[in-house]
Image (tube, rainbow, N blue to C red):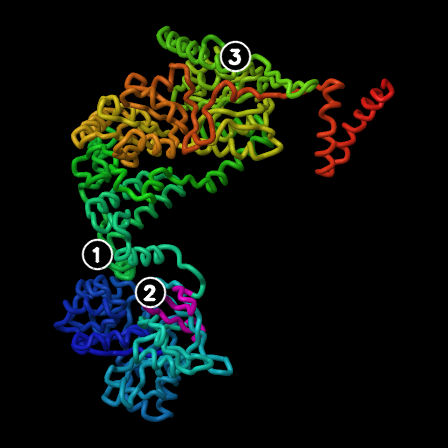
Amino acid sequence: MILPQLSVSEALADAARLATFSRVGDVLLTNIAGHEADLVQLFDVASCWVEVPPTLDTDAVVKLLDGGATKVVIDYSGESVKPLLEVLPGDRVVLVISDVERALKAADSEPVPSSVDGLIFEVDERFLQSEAGQDAFLGALSTFPGGDVRILFRAKGTQGITPQVVLQSNEKGIDAVVPASQFGGDAIDLGAAFAACLKTDRPDGLFPTIVVDEQGVALGLCYSSKESIAEAVKTGQGVYQSRNRGLWYKGQSSGATQKLIKIDYDCDQDTLRFTVQQADPGFCHLNTRTCFGADNGISALARTLESRKTAAPEGSYTRRLFEDKTLLHSKIMEEADELVQATDKDEIAWETADLIFFALTKCVANGVSLTDVEKHLDRRAKKVVRRPGNAKPKWDLAKKEESGAVNGAQPAKPVAAVAEPPSDGRIRMRTHVFTQTSPEQQQALLLRPIIKTSEIMSRVKPIVEQVRTGGDKALLHLTATIDKVQLDTPVMKAPFPAAAMAITDDVKKAIDQAYDNIHKFHDAQLDRGVLRVETMPGVVCTRFFRPIERVGLYVPGGTAVLPSSTLMLGVPAKVAGCSEIVVATPPRKDGTVAPEVVYVADKIGATTLLIAGGAQAVAAMAYGTESVPKVDKICGPGNQYVTAAKMVAQGDSSAMVSIDMPAGPSELLVIADATSNPAYVASDLLSQAEHGTDSQVVLLTVGLNPEQIAAIENEIHTQGSALPRADIVRVSIAKSYIMQMDTVEEAMRFSNMYAPEHLILHCKDAETLVEQVMNAGSVFVGQWSPESCGDYASGTNHTLPTYGYARMYSGVNTLTFVKHITSQMLTKEGLDRLGDTVTTLAAVEGLEAHRNAVAIRLKDIRGDDAKAK
């Protein structure tokens, strides 16, 4: 291989020539004295080795490497080299051996450092003028005991190196340093010299060539010859060898030209890689960018954004991002904050993708390409001196935690605000105007964050299987491992001990009243009569209910106390008449269950209290263990692991268990008109936002002016900042949004499409709007109906469909715990009237046994009738 060499003054005077040299690899820059400050601009053009003068101190050499020099070339004979070798990374250092004869003779007794990347031996050009001299010199270098150190040579004098010497040295695995003055004209052809180093065993002498873009994405495969390589290097274009038509100048007729960035070869020197800048429509003759189908990943995103910078429709979200710097900057900060808050693998990947999208949008908006970004990454990788990397005071969370500003009395300002930069630290929802959003944007606002369950399922399935096969022993082991609680038994059987239900009188009174209201409402849902219909004379059909005998109720717990969830699940199960009620809830740190939960479990007639949580509790109820009864249906909310375990159990036919509904994060939608109370609206939004960082709340304003909307926003910030769970609210509110609507009808249509878990109507004559509700888990009508009442004690159930499932699922109710059975009774006359219809349809379907079961009876009926006549 060859290493072109030119002085810095030559490179500065003719950057295009430097770029030409860079097409075949690195370039050695010499005579840098007085030009040190100018080198950085050359590093952007080519991958440069820099030969440093002996007068340059260690700090200056390090600065060159930090500035982007690929390697530094140092005279090994100087006294200053030893301290440099102690400081510099060996893979970035090449040594010049000027006294070649001495170095070769003393190779064994005085070995050259093997920790460096390369050695350049300087030879008097007279030794290279004869074949004998060439053979002797190159033969000696090829046996030099340098280990894996790269061996190069260059000639002293003015005659330089001949093409024959370059070829001969390459055959021995030695690289030649060739001055720039020797390229061009009748001297060495740069492309031909590069091609001379290649190998091929193909009869046609061609080299397979992989063509890639600047990000390394493969565009296609073609072939090169030594002639086409030389032409490509000379013209700076993608030039290849067509096996039918000779030299192929890519894009010459189609316009899909290529700017050649670099040519390199593989480890066997028989396959090439052309790195090019591809013009539209692309490399393939089918007018696609690659011959392998559509692009994907970050590079595809960058190209899409580049095209949309000029072609995005007016009013589209992408156009807004390009034109509204405040919006774009706000989104970048919002997504950075969400990435910081993310915890599990899928969530981190999702938030990283969001951040990359908005960061690339800023790049494209300002003419910064992905290649520009990668250049900076590559340059940073070359740095020798590393800065500490501490965060600036504004973002230093560690110092804020030390000062109590995080999770303390003075909440830290969020890393990002949504509507504008976070300098004011406000808790604020995003704002949209319905008439100014495109249908695509509206559809996007209806979507919830994608929940990717593959990783969660991979964790849950082994847990379920452990409990299925290991029973109580596995259950206790998982409780000890996951909950860090050692238990002697995983269950508490009814009747429960009084000591386990010790609660204060006021709590007992509150639970009792809530129980009465919930019982009254759910009892009214059960029609205990039998539906009886005579569909035709002599044919009577009935439908009657029966309770699901064995049910499992999952009540989230651990550090939380949730008697309300126990009531919401247990009361309808009791009303339905379920004979076996198993309540599962995680243990507290001391191994006990909250007495409020035990009190409700006793009140609803639970037969077993399973002291376990998560996927292991669901598995125990689904399959049964030595002490946990197997149930027929599992109901109740929980985290992603509980939901995944319920789905696994339902999908396993050996478990024979059903579940109530799919579940997702809590959500609420409020429709508010000018009659609404800003403080009430804000309090309702915050009541759901505090559930978790993945909660989402939506406010649809109808006819509110800016001052009225600002009043609600102020209440959200003021009330939210005072909450104990303010840090959670800051995150969930930032993901939520306000949509400004013109009419109530418009708002109701949007709400029905969103299908919220909770819908609150803060509107004039709110009760008249209920008839327009098509999709919602539960509706709260008017300003005096806060969602909290439904959560605890009004009587309706708070276990509701989320994530848009309100389109097809109901919340938990009494009918959740019953099944309906039908019966039919036919008289002799009834069968006679219906029989021909049945036998005809059975014959059409080819089910002879079905037809015969009726026909055999009809024969007897009609035979008796015929005799009577």
Quadrant of the image for the N terminus?
A: bottom left
**Residue drawn at 23 percent across, 47 percent down:** 328
Amino acid at pointer 1: Asn
Amino acid at pointer 3: Gly
Which label's residue is closer to the chain start, 3 or 2?
2
* Image coordinates for residue 257, horizontal then vertical, percent: 33, 72
* Image coordinates for residue 354, horizontal then vertical, percent: 32, 46
Picture quadrant where residue 854 is located: top right
Q: Residues within 10 Å of mark 1 (few under 14, many from 20)?
A: few
How far apart are labels 1 and 2 at the CA level?
19 Å
**Residues marked 3 and 1 touching at CB (< 8 Å):** no
Residue placed under numbered mark 2 in the picture? 214
Q: Residue 34 carries which label?
A: none
Q: What element carries label 1?
A: loop
Residue placed under numbered mark 3 in the picture? 605
Q: Can residue 653 be seen in this view?
A: yes
Return the residue nearer the eye: 665 or 599.
665
Specify start and end residues of the magenta stretch as a single range.
266-290
How far apart are labels 3 and 2 at the CA level?
69 Å
Which label's residue is closer to the chain start, 1 or 2?
2
The answer to whether 493 is drawn above or below residue 395 in the figure is: above
* Image coordinates for residue 548, horizontal then vertical, percent: 58, 20
- The residue at the far left in this view is 34
The answer to whether 620 is drawn above or below residue 225 in the figure is: above
Q: Is residue 481 visible?
A: no
- On screen, residue 212 versus residue 818, left or right, reads left
Residue 284 on the magenta span: yes
